[in-house]
Image: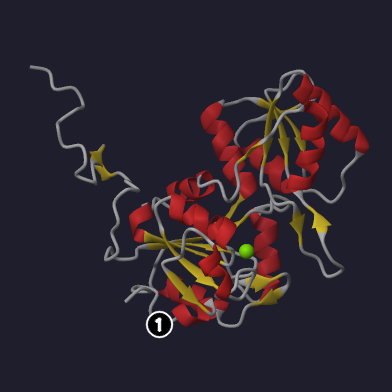
Amino acid sequence: MPTGCGDGRIGTGIRAVDGRIADNWLVSTPDEPILSYLTDMDGVLVHEDHLVPGADKFLAELRGNEIPFLVLTNNSIRTPRDLQARLRHTGLDIPEEAIWTSALATATFLNDQRPNGTAYVVGESGLTTALHEIGYVLTDSDPDYVVLGETRTYSFEAITTAIRLVDRGARFIATNPDATGPSREGLLPATGSVAALITRATGKEPYYVGKPNPLMMRSALRRIGAHSQSTVMIGDRMDTDIVSGLEAGMRTVLVTTGISTRESVEQFPYRPTLVVDSVADLVGRTDKPFA
Ligand SMILES: [Mg+2]
């Protein structure tokens, strides 16, 4: 008698798929050992061009103990190589392969959805390089997608082209929903603000791949071959890092070196597994952060 795939064990929590253990976010596994880390970059490891004290020791411990990790950023302007150079300036030595941007997550998503497709891109080298690397052709002639990323050099012409292509049916994707970004002089308009301009003109909302979409976490986990139940997500924002870590099935650590404060945690309908003042507080216990 054929049994198909239903073996009557639904609800056992963990199921083996192709010999690997698949994620099941409904199952809480508080005692699962920590095997890997995802960590946000800005507000956790660095503040713009300055090191968060102790972040270097935290990363050194992960590398010393051979704990796989990825450093995440929603900013799609730079390639991992450019980011690596910038981080080295602050005193952080992070391999290029350990950096995961919303541009890479977007390219991974598009490669899964529509391999070898075409896109009209409004963005910088972080995004165009990522799309080239998955074999996408960048064109303004009837593209499959309009892909919007972070840029500091918006042109009216490029936005007009994007609007016309979306209006004619190109699918609208944006790397991250952030409305603003920080700078020394004050706020900068970010991808979400420019997306609003295109949306206002076309009536079409983009699909955002970056945080808080847990898709960004899922692709990061796959990148290092990690599983959500044995991975910790560290972030400084409740409404992006913590919620997307939670929704991707990870345990989460909020650090208060960035945006969210200890006091603000109670205002959210969800909470992190742990709140610490800084990643420096995890040094010496990266293998058991919740013990
Ligand atoms: Mg941050």
Q: Position of residue 128 (x, y in %)?
A: 72, 40
Callout 1: SS: loop
Q: Is residue 101 above or below residue 38?
A: above
Kind of residue at badge 1: Gly
Nearest the viewer among 214 and 82 is 214
Q: Residues within 10 Å of mark 1 (few under 14, many from 20)?
A: few
Q: Quadrant of the C terminus?
A: bottom left
Residue depicted at 81% across the width and 30% down the height: 162
Residue depicted at 66% across the width and 68% down the height: 87
Question: Can see residue 71?
Answer: no
Q: Position of residue 179 (x, y in %)?
A: 74, 51
Nearest the viewer among 140 and 26 is 26
Which quadrant of the render holds ligand 1?
bottom right
Question: Can see residue 182?
Answer: yes
Left or right relative to 69: residue 1: left
Q: Position of residue 282 (x, y in %)?
A: 45, 78
Q: Quadrant of the N terminus?
A: top left
Q: Residue furthest left?
A: 1
Left or right relative to 247: residue 213: right
Left or right relative to 74: residue 194: right
Q: Quadrant of residue 198?
A: top right
Is the residue marked 1 within 8 Å of ligand 1, measured from its CB? no
Residue depicted at 86% across the width and 34% down the height: 158
- Residue placed under numbered mark 1 in the picture: 284
Residue depicted at 65% across the width and 72% down the height: 46
Q: Position of residue 169 (x, y in %)?
A: 72, 19
Query: Disc count in the image?
Result: 1
